[in-house]
Amino acid sequence: MTSISSDLSPSMPARRRSRVLPYVVLLILAALVAGLVWYATRPVAMLVQGEAEAPRVDVSARVPGRVVELGADVGDRVEQGALLVRLENAQLTTNLGAAQAALVVAQRNETAIGATRPEIIRAREAELAAAERKVEAAQAQLELTRAGASPEDRAVAAAQVDQARAAIGQAEANIDELTVTAPQGGQVTGRMVELGENVGAGAPLFTIVDLDRTWFTFNIRENLLGGLKVGDRLRVQVPALDAQVDATVTLINAQGDFASWRATRATGDFDLRSFEVRAAPATPVPGLRPGMSALIRPAEAEGA
């Protein structure tokens, strides 16, 4: 018996290991499955995509004309008041000359109405001397002649002068509009005219974007705001720059009904509005341009 037991003893640990091994494998597999389930169902802050924006101005002229000079091109940086385009319009120049001539006529007419010619006065005096029996009537005629035009006539003449001056002012303003300048500083991102081209009033000529005043805009459903408020700080990811940008919320504004999420009666939910959220970078971001994507997690916002 002793010899038989000694012969079997070395094989006992191997048999135990063979029996335990499947349980170890099952435990490892269960742990892996549990880890995968946790990773797939873990709470993750919602990622919201927006984009960078900047003040944009489409420049046009108030009056029509032919392009005779271009002061900027696409890609140029311009300051406010810089020349963009100069137009030419012969009709406007002619209108100014006509208005100036009309003013001269109105002024001379006003002078003529306010004065009575000396020869008319002498004739009336002679009539008074010769008409001994019609002294009173002749005297009245003389006084009327000396008085000149009536107050109404004088007022009309003065109004005509004012009207002529106003016409000159309008003609000069139209001439000034032939020179189109930049309403704001920034970069020229669009030029829609060529030298020698005829353009109409209100036609777009240039587009200027102020890259020094960029901001981020996001459209967020209200149930995802997570208590976000003006003044909170956001960490904005800009994939195009491979950078993280600190920004401050400057605006939270409800959008129109077209941007609402409509619930169905079957679900028992309620309608949800979308809000426009704007955030301004804490410091200038080199290379940031309008249209670049921006990513945030509203739940990770920091209070002011």
Image (spheres, grey):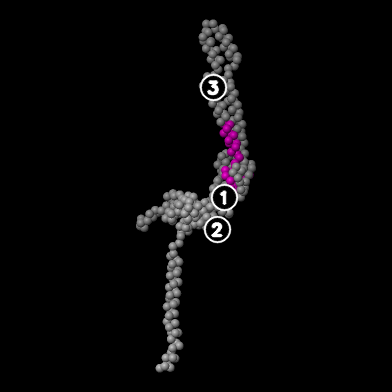
The residue depicted at 60 percent of the width and 30 percent of the height is: 100
Q: Amino acid at mark 2?
A: Ala
Please indicate, yes or no, whether residue 20 appears anywhere in the rendered image: yes
Q: Residue 174: where, in percent of width, then height?
A: 58, 36
Query: What residue span does the magenta drawing correspond to?
Result: 167-196
In which quadrant is the N terminus drawn?
A: bottom left
175 over 287 or under it: above or below: above
Q: Amino acid at mark 3?
A: Arg
Q: Secondary structure at mark 3?
A: helix
Q: Are marks 3 and 1 in contact (CB under 8 Å)?
A: no
Residue corresponding to mark 3: 154
Upstream in sequence: badge 1 or badge 2: 1
The residue depicted at 44 percent of the width and 62 percent of the height is: 43
Q: Residue 176: where, in percent of width, then height?
A: 60, 37
Q: Classify 10 Å Cα crowding around label 2: few (below 14), some (14-19), many (20 and above).
A: few
**Image side of residue 14 versus residue 108, left or right:** left
Residue corresponding to mark 1: 211
User: Which callout, 1 or 2, points to the residue nearer the camera?
Assistant: 2
Q: Indicate whether residue 169 is drawn in magenta.
A: yes
State the mark number for residue 243: 2
Q: Classify 10 Å Cα crowding around label 1: few (below 14), some (14-19), many (20 and above).
A: many
Which residue is more in the foreground, 131 or 23? 23
Tell how many labels: 3
Q: Disc 2 versus disc 3: distance between alpha carbons?
A: 75 Å
Q: Amino acid at mark 1?
A: Leu
**Image side of residue 117 versus residue 136, left or right:** right
The residue depicted at 59 percent of the width and 25 percent of the height is: 107
Q: Disc 1 versus disc 2: distance between alpha carbons?
A: 18 Å
Q: Indicate whether residue 214 is drawn in magenta.
A: no
User: Which callout, 2 or 3, points to the residue nearer the camera?
Assistant: 2
Q: Residue 216: where, in percent of width, then height?
A: 51, 52
